Image (cartoon, grey):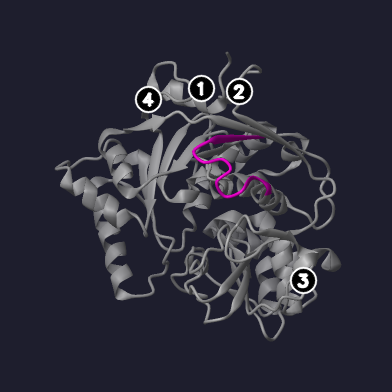
């Protein structure tokens, strides 16, 4: 019997052949924490009695969830992170650098075939670059910090094929929302999901990262894709990765516990309704729902391609007077490039609020918390109660195009009417 991508990568890092269901102790290529999780990582590391981390070059902390700091308590955590980095030699991406899941691949920490752990649930994002990456708890991350290894139960794999030509106004966010709506929030619990098909091949790397980012929303441990010429180009140009790329592919006779096939030629813009990501609908079934806030950005859809899509819609419009439209490029390099291309000027002229790269509005820590009863449409990945800072508000999820169109109309709107 052949092996899946997950079985191959975990076997390579365990130094022995593993199959689904096996337990392996695996070397980890890179690990990280963010400012919502790093304090506990540091505390757990100190309790171990260790003074040196396994490899300072392979552990980074990212200040992104509350950046810049909104209060004294968070400032103390940031101080703790900076002091730990200075004392141990660990890497640190400070406030303003950007969102961890965008900065980490940009800075060359991800390569095909690598094994990555992050103290953040959306670490599965890097699967779009043919890596195995997963979120873990802070204490588990501290174990890797001490040993350079961690234990894994090799997951069963699910194969999803996506074929068909996307119509105008339909994007990768619509694809993954549709799939989650079909599979359900627990449809792939602790599975490694492998994405294939002509549609996936036709997507940019930016768009693929959106899909892998949301694999966890259907319970997946990993959301992985193959490495092709587009991935190699991304790694060379964006991440400045030098040398060859050792892509990992599944064997033709690999075993999958489930196979699903989707044709997206007829797909329409999708929206996830409160309060579950699986609660999806076509945009036209819920258009005219009034919104108070629109958020364009996050680790799901804050990349340059997303900025371009939103700017195209906002170019000749202003944000509806009833709506606050917040735009947050996901990294400083994306912010710089968006400024060069005129997207930031477009957002400002449309009367959006452009903020520094970070997770604040999405995570609900600052820079966009909703009032009781307010509704937001967001390009983020979660719409659970309290996700944007207030359990008495309502969050809709959609593509940057749908978010931008809704910001213009003051209600959930079909982006196809603005393209």
Is the Cβ of the residue at disc 3 closer than 8 Å to that at disc 4? no
| Foreground label between 1 and 4 | 4
Mark 1, Cα crowd under 10 Å, few <14 / some 14-19 / many 20+, is many
Task: Give the percent coordinates (x, y) of residue 178.
Answer: 70, 51
Label 2 – label 1 distance at C-alpha: 8 Å
Q: What residue is drawn where x is 44% and y is 19%? A: 18
Q: Quadrant of residue 199?
A: top right
Residue stretch in magenta: 182-195
Upstream in the sequence, badge 2 or badge 3?
Answer: 2
Q: Is residue 244 visible?
A: no
Mark 3, Cα crowd under 10 Å, few <14 / some 14-19 / many 20+, is some
Judged from the image, the secondary structure of the residue bearing numbered disc 2 is loop
Q: Which residue is mark 3?
A: 287
Q: What residue is drawn where x is 53% and y is 59%? A: 332
Residue 8 disc label: 1
Upstream in the sequence, badge 3 or badge 4?
Answer: 4
Q: Indicate whether 85 appears above or below 29.
A: below
Q: Which residue is mark 2?
A: 250
> Which residue in the rendered view is the most extreme toward the bottom?
321
Is the Cβ of the residue at disc 1 closer than 8 Å to that at disc 4? no
Residue 29 disc label: none
Label 3 – label 1 distance at C-alpha: 45 Å
> Which residue in the rendered view is the most extreme toward the top?
1
Q: Which residue is mark 4?
A: 24
Q: What residue is drawn where x is 57% and y is 64%? A: 275
- Left or right: 418 in relation to 158: right
């Amino acid at each position: 019997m052949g092996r899946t991508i997950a079985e191959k990568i975990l076997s390579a890092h365990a130094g022995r052949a593993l199959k689904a269901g096996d337990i392996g102790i695996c070397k980890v290529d890179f690990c990280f924490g963010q400012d919502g999780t790093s304090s506990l990582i540091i505390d757990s590391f100190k309790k171990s009695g260790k003074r040196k981390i396994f490899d300072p070059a392979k552990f980074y902390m990212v200040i992104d969830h509350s950046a810049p700091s909104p209060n004294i308590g968070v400032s103390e955590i940031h101080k703790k992170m900076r002091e730990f980095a200075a004392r141990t030699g660990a890497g640190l991406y400070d406030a303003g650098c950007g969102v961890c899941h965008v900065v980490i691949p940009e800075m060359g920490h991800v390569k095909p075939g690598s094994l990555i752990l992050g103290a953040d649930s959306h670490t599965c994002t890097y699967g779009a670059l043919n890596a195995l990456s997963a979120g873990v708890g802070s204490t588990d991350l501290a174990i890797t910090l001490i040993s350079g290894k961690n234990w894994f139960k090799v997951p069963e794999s699910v194969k999803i094929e996506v074929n068909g030509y996307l119509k105008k106004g339909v994007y990768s966010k619509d694809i993954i929302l549709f799939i989650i709506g079909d599979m359900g929030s627990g449809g792939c619990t602790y599975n490694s999901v492998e994405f294939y098909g002509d549609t996936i091949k036709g997507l940019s790397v930016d768009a693929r990262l959106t899909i892998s980012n949301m694999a966890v929303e259907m319970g997946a441990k990993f959301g992985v894709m193959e490495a092709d010429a587009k991935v190699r180009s991304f790694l060379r140009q964006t991440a400045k990765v030098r040398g060859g790329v050792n892509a990992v592919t599944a064997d033709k006779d690999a075993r999958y516990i489930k196979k699903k096939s989707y044709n997206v030629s007829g797909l329409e813009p999708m929206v996830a309704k409160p309060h579950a990501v699986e609660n999806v609908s076509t945009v036209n079934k819920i258009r005219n729902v009034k919104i108070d806030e629109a958020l364009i950005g996050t680790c799901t859809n804050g990349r340059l391609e997303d900025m371009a899509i939103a700017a195209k819609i906002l170019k000749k419009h202003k944000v509806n007077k009833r709506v606050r439209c917040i735009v947050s490029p996901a990294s400083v390099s994306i912010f710089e490039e968006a400024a060069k291309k005129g997207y930031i000027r477009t957002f400002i002229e449309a009367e959006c609020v452009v903020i520094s790269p970070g997770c604040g509005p999405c995570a609900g820590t600052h820079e966009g918390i909703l009032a009781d009863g307010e509704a937001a449409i967001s390009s983020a990945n979660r719409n659970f109660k309290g996700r944007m800072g207030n359990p008495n508000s309502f969050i809709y999820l959609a593509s940057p195009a749908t978010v931008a169109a809704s910001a213009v109309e003051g209600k959930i709107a079909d982006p196809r009417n603005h393209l």
